[in-house]
Image: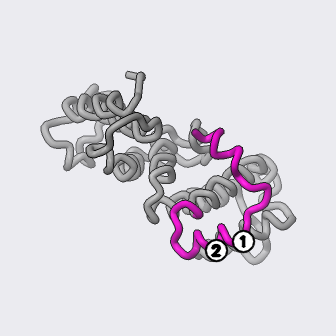
Amino acid sequence: INQRLNRHLPGRLPKLVDAMARWGSPSAALVVAMYMTEFCMASYESVRRRGRIGQGETWEKYKQICDDMGRAKDVDGSYSAEAMTFDLVHLWKRGARLGSKFCQAVLGEAFYCGGGVQLSQIRCIRDIEQAVLWLNKAVDHGEKFEGVDPMLARSELLLGYIFQDGESGEESYSDMFLYAGTGSYSEAVFWFRRAAKHGSIER
């Protein structure tokens, strides 16, 4: 899925796409998040070593986008790789809050795995509560959806793994799963079945 979308990413970020993201378009916000993630992660090691972002039109656009979100940079130009990662997460959250299922699924997987995963290069920390939050939003239409949807199935599968892990005693997520119903095991089975219904062949 990611490779297919990346082939259609523009060489430069069109001003109209950035403007539409600021105006509340989920699709435009997704494009901005994907574009800036690809660009920034390619320069991650350079930013980490130098402690500042690079020069050029794309970096200036990146700074402007972050400023628009209230993420103003230090006056002296210093900028850590960790700060860049934090800002990228907020770009994805903007798309997710606007309703992009792709953004929600990417955030959920990134927080579940701790970043650097197939759908997202974001180097975020592992945060199961955030993973559950965004994965639940990504799958909230799944009950009525019929047919195969790889993105939906993957998000449902990850929810199954989370509940399965909690039930096995490897990690306890019971405090945050106030909505878990009859228990983690039954929830895991529910999500695995939903994932299979939408095309997942993993277990």
The residue that appears at 67% across and 58% down in the rendered structure is 84
In front of the other: 42 or 138: 138
**Any magenta on residue 16?**
yes
In front of the other: 179 or 47: 179
Q: Is mark 1 on a helix, strand or loop?
A: helix
Residue 4 visible? The answer is yes
Residue 129, percent from left and from top: 36, 49
How packed is label 2: few (under 14 Cα within 10 Å), some, or many (20 or more)?
A: some
The residue that appears at 37% across and 36% down in the rendered structure is 147
Q: Name the residue under label 1.
A: 15
Residue 102, percent from left and from top: 50, 50
**Any magenta on residue 30?**
no
Left or right: 86 as drawn, with respect to 137:
right
Q: Which residue lies furthest to the front in this view?
A: 147
Tally of marks: 2
Residue 165, percent from left and from top: 33, 30
How packed is label 1: few (under 14 Cα within 10 Å), some, or many (20 or more)?
A: few
Q: Residue furthest left?
A: 182
In front of the other: 174 or 161: 161
Magenta stretch bounds: 1-28
Image vertical order of residue 10 relative to residue 113, above or below: below
Image vertical order of residue 142 relative to residue 157, above or below: below
Q: What residue type is labelled 2?
A: Ala
Q: Name the residue under label 2.
A: 19
Mark 2 touching mark 1, by CB under 8 A? yes
Left or right: 7 as drawn, with respect to 113:
right
Q: Quadrant of the N terminus?
A: top right
Residue 52 visible? The answer is no
Find residue 128 and report its image quarter: top left
Image vertical order of residue 157 relative to residue 126, above or below: above
Q: What residue type is labelled 1?
A: Lys
- Disc 2 to disc 1, C-alpha distance: 6 Å
